[in-house]
Image: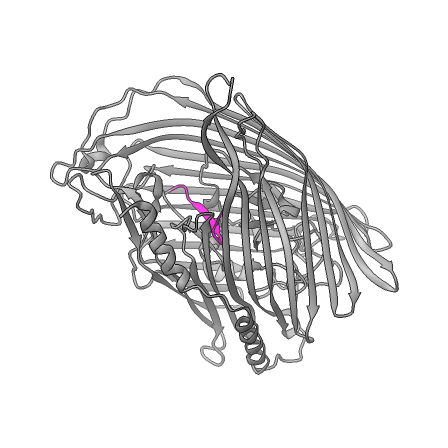
Amino acid sequence: MSLSSLRRQDAAVVRSSLALRPLALAVHMLAVGAAVTALPVYAAEPTEEAVTLDAVSITGEAEGGLSDVTEGTQSYTTRAAKTATPLKMSLRETPQSVTVVTQQRIQDQDLQTIADVVNNTVGVSLNRYETSRGQINARGFELNSLMIDGVPTIYEQPWSSGEIFGSLAMYDRVEVVRGANGLMTGAGDPSASLNMVRKRANSKELTGSVEVSAGTWDTYGTLGDLSMALNEEGTIRARLVGEYNDGDSWIDHHTNKRETFYGTMDIDLSEDTTLWFGASRQENNSDSPAWGGLPVWYSDGSETNWSRSTSMSTDWSKWDTTYESYFVNLEHTFANDWHAKLGYTRGERDGDSYLIYPFGSPDPVTGLMGGYGAGSYKTNTTQDDYYLQVDGPVELFGRSHDVAFGYTHSDQDFDADTRGYIPTANYDFNDFYDMPEPDWQPLTDSDASETTQKALYAATRINLADDLKVILGVRSTDYEKEQGNSKIKEDDEITPYAGIVYDLTENLSAYASYTDIFLPQSQHDINDNQLNPIVGESYETGLKAEFFDGRLNASAAVFRIKQDNLAESTGLFIPGKTPPTFAYEEGDGATSDGFELEINGELAPGWNLMAGYTQFDVEDADGEDVNTQYPTKMIRTFTTYRVPGFLGDKLTIGGGVNWQDSIYVYAANPSGVAEKVEQDAYALVNLMARYEITENLSAQLNANNVTDEKYMDFFEAYGAFTYGAPRSLTASAKYSF
């Protein structure tokens, strides 16, 4: 059977089980709302709540009357997020799927890296194909950009150096918007946006915490977070965050050391003007990392069955990275409740690696393989981001409406040098760790690029009636990238945004939205004209519910994402082009159809819940499944409960399950025949318990993958795979003051 036939057969099976029923979803959502309202009612006493923590606001002041329940409380949701649009809107008012991973959930689940957030968020998944790298996917499409404080600070990161394994220590929360988000990000894929929101110096009192931890594989860590006022009036505030984490891995010889430092200050220049600035440094030193995955087959065609501890590295391999960031923001509120925000961020990312990639299939007896590819790279990425935004209310036709407009400018310079080496013909895979280090040659130029994005955007929320809102937005982007002899240039690329929200009841809203995003491409057609950018379009409709004064949010969504203009080879050469260059044409891309259900927040006092289900089907223009190394059905759940009356109301217990359906790839076996490699559906069970020893001191225990499930991710291009983490325990103690 051909590779194409195999894929079509699998696609038919998936399609037969993926029938979308929007009406059924709506009925289910209404049932969820009815069940929620039947839960125990909150006590009438007031609760301490922090205020809006959007990407560029003052933590100590509310914007637009919205209060956030993230920092300083025990919540699994927020009332506001600004990653989807620049407007001040609650989650219920946003006509797009939004998940906020709050500080409380970060602490409860002991989430330490961006990858941890991805693995525990509805609608997104991570394919970890090496120890130090991986690829995020959402709704069937890759995610290749990250945002910090609402600005796409890391976009098109070349030569990935483990950005997704960066520490969360300096961030208060992570906002995830699924679907195309071109209004806020510019160029990218129609998948999702991850926005990391920095911690703010919002306390006028001396507050903070110190945490120490120890866990499986001799992993030890400490985290300190200190906030204070530097003057008696509290108008000058500072915050310092420091983290150190060092430990081994479930993979033999592999160790990782992570250090993070973050400092920030808020200075109230007046009652209406605040200057916010800071700096951070994250350093990650990885010894004996894998470059590539474990072989699927032995040379005789039999399947391997490696231990999860099997190493793919040597004692001299390493991959060290640093990321330094400097930022300054000025914010002002005018007398008419308009706001102006001006900001600049500079990021500098450096990487230095000495790596080795074994290829071929080992002999089952001798362990000999075909060879290896060594690589040593020194990389540097510098990015400067500027932004200006003005937003506020407008009175028109007897109603108040919201308007926002702004300008962004990003410059990214990337440079990579490489060290040559003298290769070795063969080696023994069984003794790979002791392989001598190659004779590295001096650094030479390898790759370089310069990318610039400039954009003007505007958005408005029109209040047509008390229960009907329309959100409209548009972005005009100039994009230019130079890499070697290649140049991509797109001027005035228009990105629209449209949404409508209708309040069905006091707690329930229906919505629909259209968003898109573009991605420039360098290929040329038969007339030597550059192809138009790839365009990703997202259509979404659903229901959103909000209960208990915003402490609980629920949603149901049906979506379709389509990617068009993808370059396809014509098999012909461009006439007169030297050297000979293939011509391409704009073809159809891929389409993803699916739905999601999600609920986040407090079901009752002391009972937090995050739960969601995602299901979709993604196919190319020929009806074949694409990106099959990512799951198309996922369950994400986690809940905590403060046990009343037991041990003096000081015990909190929790747990959750992350489930996904089967994934697969086709790879060439030792005979050169395409063979299906599959990971069956699996579930990971995670548990936690926390006990408050005193008012200031608490102890916590987290257990991940309690059932010790053995599972793997794929490196599709080379018929290789990487095992996920086995069972692990982490014990921590935290002192807060």
Is 693 within the magenta? no
Give the left or right position of residue 251, taking residue 510 as reference. left
| Above or below 58: residue 284 | above
| Magenta-tinted stretch | 132-142
| Above or below 539: residue 640 | below
The x and y percentages for residue 186 are 63, 42
Give the left or right position of residue 42, taking residue 399 as reference. left
In this orientation, which residue lies closer to the viewer: 436 or 10? 10
Residue 281 visible within the image: yes
Residue at the spot 62% in from the left edge and 63% down from the top edge: 78
Give the left or right position of residue 673, taking residue 469 as reference. left
- Asked which colour scheme the image uses, the reply is one colour
The x and y percentages for residue 152 are 60, 42
Q: Residue 88's image quarter?
A: bottom right
In this orientation, which residue lies closer to the viewer: 248 or 229? 248
Is 135 within the magenta? yes
Q: How many marks?
A: 0
Residue at the spot 35% in from the left edge and 18% down from the top edge: 441
Residue at the spot 55% in from the left edge and 34% down from the top edge: 521
The x and y percentages for residue 9 are 33, 55
In this orientation, which residue lies closer to the viewer: 530 or 603? 530
